[in-house]
Amino acid sequence: MSKSKETFNKKEKEKARQRKQQEKAQKKEERKSVQKKGKSLEEMMAWVDADGNLVTSPPDPSEKKTFSAEDIQISTPKFVEADADEKHSGVVSRYNDEKGYGFIRDQVKQQDVFFHINQVVGGQIKERDRVTFKTERGPKGISAVNVRISN
């Protein structure tokens, strides 16, 4: 008598595969039976309560609050453009000679202001030089123009 070509392990793997297929088919049938197609508009609606949470029931119209537009205050500060004619003074804090740009530390505001070598009037500029300059709003922010070495 010859031996069967299927081993015990192969039989067990086949049984497990068939069991998985049956479980999958059973879950699919359960999903189909529970699924509701074409929900009504009322079932799909969601409302926002006074605290900002989503709820399934509409808010009570008797608790509705009204506000006038004059009562709403916006607390963002208005942008004040710096006076373009005002001269500033500062010290060159960083300068890259190879790339031709640097930063000036404003003495009053203690902020760094970008400058390019094309905006330097007069001689060569290096780090720790005292300079006077005007500011101008450029495409990437405020930059120094008309930079001069002060004595």
Image (cartoon, helix red, strand yellow):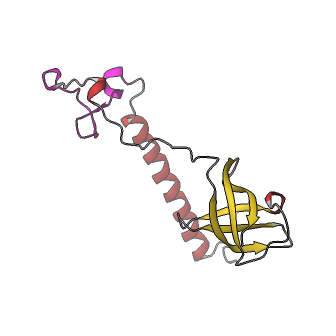
Give percent across and percent down for residue 62. 13, 21
In this view, 127 is above or below 64: below
Identify which residue, 102 or 29, lies in the foreground.
102
- Please indicate, yes or no, whether residue 147 appears anywhere in the rendered image: yes
Residue at the extreme front: 151
Identify which residue, 150 or 140, lies in the foreground.
150
- Of the 4 image quadrants, the one containing the N terminus is bottom right
Give percent across and percent down for residue 126. 78, 76
- Please indicate, yes or no, whether residue 141 appears anywhere in the rendered image: no
Give percent across and percent down for residue 101. 78, 66
Q: Quadrant of residue 147?
A: bottom right
Q: Read off the magenta span.
A: 39-63
Does residue 38 appear to the left or right of 47 in the view shown? right
> Residue placed at 86% from the left, 72% from the top?
98
Residue 1 belongs to the span the image colors magenta: no
> Residue placed at 85% from the left, 71% from the top?
124
Does residue 72 appear to the left or right of 82 in the view shown? left
Give the total of numbered labels. 0
> Residue placed at 58% from the left, 64% from the top?
14
Q: Quadrant of residue 90?
A: bottom right
Residue at the extreme left: 62
Does residue 51 appear to the left or right of 137 in the view shown? left
Identify which residue, 75 or 20, lies in the foreground.
75
In this view, 99 is above or below 77: below
In this view, 140 is above or below 113: above
Residue 41 belongs to the span the image colors magenta: yes
Identify which residue, 20 or 9, lies in the foreground.
20
- Of the 4 image quadrants, the one containing the C terminus is bottom right
> Residue placed at 70% from the left, 68% from the top?
131
Give percent across and percent down for residue 34. 36, 36
